[in-house]
Image (cartoon, rainbow, N blue to C red):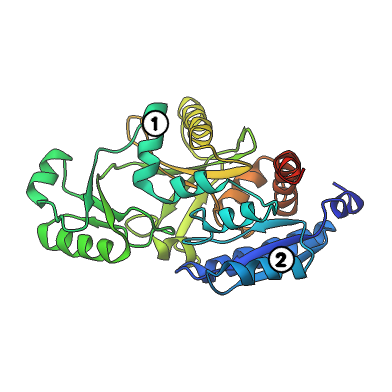
Amino acid sequence: MTHSMAKQMGRVGVLMGGPSSEREISMKSGKAVVSALEEAGCDVVKIVIDSTEEEPLIRAIRNEAVEIAFIALHGAFGEDGTVQKMLEMHHIPYTGSGSRASHLAMNKVLTFRQLREEGLPFPAHVILTQGEKGDFPQLAGDLKGPPLVVKPAAQGSSIGINIVSDPPQYEEAVRQAFELDDEVLVEAYVPGKEITSGVLGEEALPLVEIRPRTAFFDFQAKYQPGMTDYIVPAEISPDAARHIQELSLRAFRGMGCQDFARMDFILGPDDRPFFLEVNTIPGFTATSLLPMAAREAGYSFSELCLQILVLSQKRNKVVFSTKNM
C-alpha cells in the first residue's frame, strides 16, 4: 500500500492505556501501532485513555477528528466489549471484534460455552463460583491430576494462573483467583507444546510454538526478555498444524470475531490439540505473537496494521453508513 493510499484511510486514532492491570502493555502496543502507521503514511493520532468514563473518550475522538479507532487496549474496559459498545453507540468505526464477541472472548467460561457446539476440544475442567472452594483430592481424581491448573475466568496476560500439586497450593491459588474474578476455572493439566494461532481476516497465519523457561507461559515469560523462545513456524507435524489452523478458524467464526484474533492451544504428546482461549486484542509490538506469525506469512508490522485497517474500514463502511442514514 502506497503512502497516498494510506492517507485515504482517513484519520486514525490509536486507543491505548486504559484502567486495567494491562495498561503498561497497552501503552507499548499503542505506541508501536502509531509508529507503524506513521511509517506507512497514515494520518494517525494517539488517544490515551485514563478512565472508564464515556464522555472524555468520545470528546477526545471528536476533538481529534478521528474517522476510525484502532483499539490497542488490553484487559478490562478495552478488551471486554465495553469500549466497543461505546464506539458503536456513537457510530465510530473501530478495528477488531464487536462488543458481543469481545465480551464472550474475555471470559474463558463464556468462551467454552459459546464454542461447545463448534466441537472445539477443551481440557477437562470444573467451574467454581464465589463461595465454592472445591475439594482438591476429588478434583484431582476427576481431572486426572495432580497437577491442576487454576485460573480466573476473565483475566488476560496469564494474570492469576497457577499450576498446583497439593491442597495448600490449591487453596492459595483459588483464593488469589477469586480476588480477581467471581468465577474460577480448575482445569486438567495437559502436558505438551504451547501453540498460538493467529487469524487475519479469513486467513489462518503460520503457527508459533512457545517455549517458556518458566513452568508455563506466565506474565514473566511473556514480558521479560529472554524468558521465552519462539519457534516460527511451530515444529509440529503438518497434519497437527493444519488441524490447529482449522480449529482456529472455526473458533474465530463461532465466536463472531472480526478482522483479527489469536487462539491459544496446548498440543499433547499424541498430537491432540486442546483449545485454551481467544485473544481478540493480542499484543501489538513488532515482537508480539500475532505480528510474529504475520511476518512469517509475509506481512511487515506496518503492513499488518494497515491490513487490519483495510479489513475494518470495509466492514465499517457498511455497518456505520446504514446507521447514519
- The residue depicted at 88 percent of the width and 49 percent of the height is 5
Say which residue label 1 marks: 120
Mark 1 in CB contact with mark 2 (< 8 angstroms):
no
Q: Residue at x 33, y 36 (%)?
A: 122
Q: Is residue 266 visible?
A: no
Q: Which residue is mark 2?
A: 61
Looking at the picture, how far across and down is residue 16, in whole percent? 61, 66
CA–CA distance in space, label 1 to label 2? 39 Å
Percent position of residue 92, x then y: 70, 54
> Closer to the camera: disc 1 or disc 2?
2
Residue occupying the point 31% across, 58% down:
161
Task: List x then y, in percent, for residue 284.
Answer: 61, 57
Report the front residue among 188 and 186. Answer: 186
For marks 1 and 2 on the same chain, the one whose residue lies earlier in the sequence:
2
Seen in the picture, residue 6 relative to 198 is either above or below; the reply is below
Q: Nearer the viewer, residue 33 or 68?
A: 68
Q: Quadrant of the C terminus?
A: top right
Decide: few, some or many residues near mark 1? Use Cα within 10 Å; few <14, some 14-19, many ≥20. Answer: some
Say which quarter of the image contains residue 59. bottom right
